[in-house]
Amino acid sequence: MSLVSKVYSALLYHGHVQESDAPLVQQPGQQQDLPGLSNELPIALHPAPSRCVTVHNNARAALEALGSWLHEEEEISNAILSYSEQLIQLQDEKGSSSSRESDLALYAFWLACWSISASDSSQDAKEIIPQLDMIAMICSSHLGSLPLLLFSPATSRLATLPPDSDVFSDPSALSGLHSLVDRLMNIVPLDSIASVMGPRRLVNLFTVVWCSRTSINRLHAPSKQLHLFRLLVNDSSHLSSNRFPPLATPSNPQGVERNVKRWRDKSATREVGVIHCVRELAEDDMEEVVDLLQLVDSFNPNQARIHAAHLLRNRLGWVLDSTKVQEPPTMQPGRIISFCEVSRQTKHLAVMDRIVTRADSRRMGYAHVLLSYVVDWLSRMGRDRVITYVPTSEPEPILRLLKGVGFEQVPDADTIQWGFENTVQNPW
């Protein structure tokens, strides 16, 4: 029994591949072209005996093979995990009576690189334990192609490399990265990879290998450099949600309106000049949200409108607006003051994104109230952690806001997005 055959038997035994996937097994030194993206995309083993790359074009199969590593490190893997889970949900809805429009993933597939340690005397698949080195996910969304998303578990040798590692630091640890890049080059057009996003060290190494293999130049600097901030909901007793009416839930969409009326009556008796309401994004908010999105991210007007519709359709947007009682001249009835979106969710974690307050209403506590409400709502929905990404160049006020709500920076968890020349990077 050849080592490559034993490797595949081990992957099959441990549930990382399926017989129905019609695997393609390559012997060392053998070259074979992969077909284009299709429903019959096979699983492929890289020729190197100690490394193999599996390719999945089905979200359910990908999570069955990779889910245990992704769930173990949700904070780092949240982009890959949340998009994969959404694809499964959309697939289930498509097969049911649901007619909800699908605006996620015109295509998606996953590559996983494995380390295999086995001797020629290991005849039983039970004796071969595959170790996951890294995952790459290619996916598109309502805004077009997403960055190539990367993840490497903390147990892999890639994750333990020093921060200043280069592609020559540890050839053994980096052989899996070379294997994955080679396999990716056989699957996708080279110019279809506009950017790469993931942990700083992993993205740095990947882009160097990708550029050396493809002769494509990366940009002089990352397009995004982000710190990761985390809030543990169970430790957020300071949010004092009892001061405010309870929020509506998906099962009670009319709750917001009733709570707003109750809050208005209560506020009016206290002679508050402006009544502020936290609520989910509504259809009447579209024009204002389109304007706000262009303030906080690199949206053009058409992209902002598409994304606002996506937020409304999937109930991902939250606003704090004002209603006139004794309103200052600078305000308008029902005007949105602060906005944020819950861009991704997994079973235990939510990602809060694009937090913005109008310039003439900043430093007045509005964003603090909005974020506190949304965190409280996420807690009611069963999430025990909320994370957000903050640009490394973000001004001090946003950092004070996040720390005031209860967020803390996660050390050694910076994320970067690095683009390549002559490509177009879509916001996401």
Image (cartoon, helix red, strand yellow):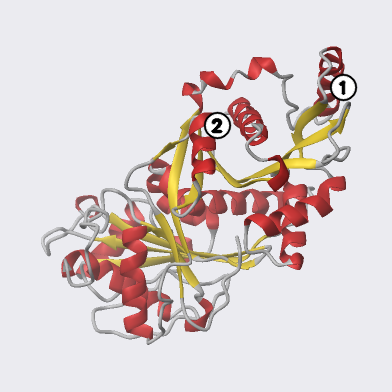
Looking at the picture, which amino acid does disc 2 mark?
Answer: Arg
In the depicted structure, whether residue 389 falls above or below residue 378: below
In the rendered view of the protein, which quadrant contains the C terminus? bottom right
Q: Is residue 112 left or right of residue 347?
A: left
Where's residue 193, x and y in %? 49, 75
Where's residue 150, x and y in %? 41, 60
What is the quadrant of residue 253 in the picture? top right
Q: Which residue is mark 1?
A: 261
* Residue at image location 32% in from the left, 82% down from the top: 212
User: Would residue 304 be visible to someone looking at this image?
Assistant: yes
CB within 8 Å, label 2 to label 1: no
In the depicted structure, whether residue 94 falls above or below residue 347: below
Q: Which residue is mark 2?
A: 383
Q: Secondary structure at mark 1?
A: helix
In the foreground, 394 or 65: 394
Where's residue 52, x and y in %? 30, 67
* Residue at image location 81% in from the left, 25% down from the top: 255
In the depicted structure, whether residue 325 falls above or below residue 159: above
In the foreground, 16 or 227: 227
What is the quadrant of residue 198 in the picture? bottom left
In the rendered view of the protein, which quadrant contains the N terminus? bottom left
